[in-house]
Image: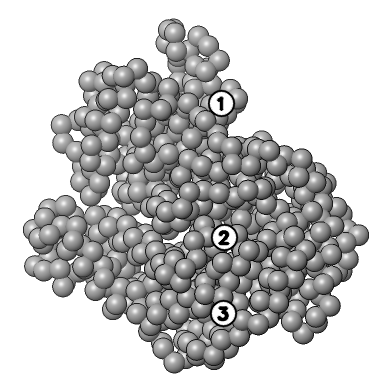
Amino acid sequence: MKNYYINSLLHGGDYNPEQWLYDPCVLETDIEYFKKAHINEVTLGIFSWAMLEPEEEQYDFGWMETIINRLYENGISVILATPSGARPKWMSDKYPEVLRVDEKRNRFLYGMRHNHCYTSPVYREKTRKMNTELAKRFGNHPGVIAWHISNEYGGECHCPLCQEAFREWLKEKYQTIDRLNFAWATTFWSHRYNGFEQIESPSLCGEYGLHGLNLDWKRFVTDRTVDFVRHEVKAIRDAGSEKPTTINMMYDYKGLNYHKFKDVVDIISWDNYPQWHKKAEYLTAMDNGMQHDIMRSIKHQPYLLMESCPAATNWQPVSKLKKPGMLHLASLQAIAHGSDSVQYFQLRQSRGSSEKFHGAVIDHYGGSDTRVFDEVTRVGKSLEQLQEIVGTQVEAKVAVLFDWENRWAMEDAQGPRNKGLYYKETVEKSYYAFRKLGLDVDVIDMEQALESYSIVAIPMLYMFRDGFENKVRTFVENGGTVIMTYWSGIVDDTDLCYLGGTPHGLMDVFGIRSTEIDALYDWESNTSIPVKGQLFENDFGMEMQKSL
């Protein structure tokens, strides 16, 4: 892994000039507009595979080279993408195995994006060749500062190749079928397996009642995706490019455990599309702030805001236009939480297809004399005045625990509520309590160390992974403060219920044993009554009381 380095605050975004190759004047106009808006970076090539390899192994990099050179000549850097997020049609036509199979075992047709199989040897080889060619040609270009690996990884495949890979993953984890049967409690409903070859991925057409199976499948999907990212990065490194790598993550995406990617890429980045201008604007700001802190806390270093919208999106239920000043405010929020960039999707608005009405720096009007362009320019000027903070760290003494695998397990638990468990919302309440006091907050998972913090809030940690209770005990013994809520320490990491009382392994630490839990109807609520004591006699205590 390379050390993190970006030597200036980046201002730019997703640039798709291949959409405009029919008009050479557009590139030169764009460059002038970029300079006017104080844009110093573009992300290039995300959806360019069909233009880079129009026929199998017939590559055309000339147009991209021209653009990278012209941008570099004008002081604009490039984060170069690998194009695996959307492949050309010739590949699907010739090699249908690259197409995903859904949980009902139906193979996808060609279309949209990210509907390919990460296990497919053909797709892996085609990706390796493309990344190798890109890295050989541009990997050491002085204008290329980093690699954007694919785009918004997500989804899962249930094809025969993935089924076999899943079985091998299970064999490595459990070693014997008896251990797997015990961990998954397969004797319930007579679902016991006689061999790994009998196991299939979860499906509504088949087995989905074994919670251990469902949980392990989600872990496998993450591991399979991590392995594919590693495969993409290896091709770049083998071709001689040492530029840092990143993947762009998504807001509140449940499908992948993002913490598992921290050792595969050099920089964390994410795509930020909050819905501003609702009734309670501060709640949107708090929610957005927590997402920023989740991303920063994955590697505990500065991250990149890879995508945002300067105007209005086109895909949200209501795509609200940002009011004057909102772009500047939201952009500086990202910087304040540790981002070293503000980037947009996209720099020039598309004329057609799915995102033709998605906001952009340069809209269909095509000029620089628009309010949105002025707003973008204001952001660019502000970032130039803040260059001295690039690479600085956020040092938090408070952490809130938000764990992907815990969320997977709890949402599949079947009780005590099967509608609205509100795990994320409960975590947010703890986060908000700290933020209202002006405290910086790390948002961590169970794997991360606790000793650097003074206070750790652990809301609704239904699942304790092996040894976590000892980590908490040691933290408390060494003077740390833990705030843990109800519905914690209920099951182990295979979703087997702990015996002997909950919270597992910590009853003596907290001085309580939970014996019952009740679910509230939507119209019910509980009111906490504070007991007089040191905890509730200060501002911190009052905020935590409100959150609980």
Q: Name the residue under label 1.
A: 439
Left/right placement of residue 51 relative to residue 523 reads right
Q: Mark 1 or mark 3: which comes first in sequence?
A: 3
Distance of label 2 from label 1 (alpha carbons): 32 Å
Q: Is mark 3 on a helix, strand or loop?
A: helix
Q: Is mark 2 on a helix, strand or loop?
A: strand
Residue at horizontal 76%, vertical 45%? 384
Residue 242 x/y as whole percent? 49, 61
Left/right placement of residue 105 relative to residue 184 reads right
Label 3: few (<14), some (14–19) or many (≥20) C-alpha neighbours in 10 Å: many
Residue at horizontal 47%, vertical 91%? 93
Residue 219 x/y as whole percent? 32, 57
Amino acid carrying label 2: it is Ala
Q: Is residue 359 visible?
A: no
Q: Mark 2 or mark 3: which comes first in sequence?
A: 3
Q: Mark 3 points at which residue?
A: 49
Left/right placement of residue 150 relative to residue 263 reads right
Q: Do the residues labelled 1 and 3 touch (CB within 8 Å)?
A: no
Q: Mark 2 or mark 1: which comes first in sequence?
A: 2
Label 1: few (<14), some (14–19) or many (≥20) C-alpha neighbours in 10 Å: some
Residue at horizontal 31%, vertical 68%? 203
Q: In this view, does 28 lie above or below 23?
A: above
Q: Of residues 166 and 304, which is closer to you in this image?
A: 304
Q: Of residues 140 and 217, which is closer to you in this image?
A: 140
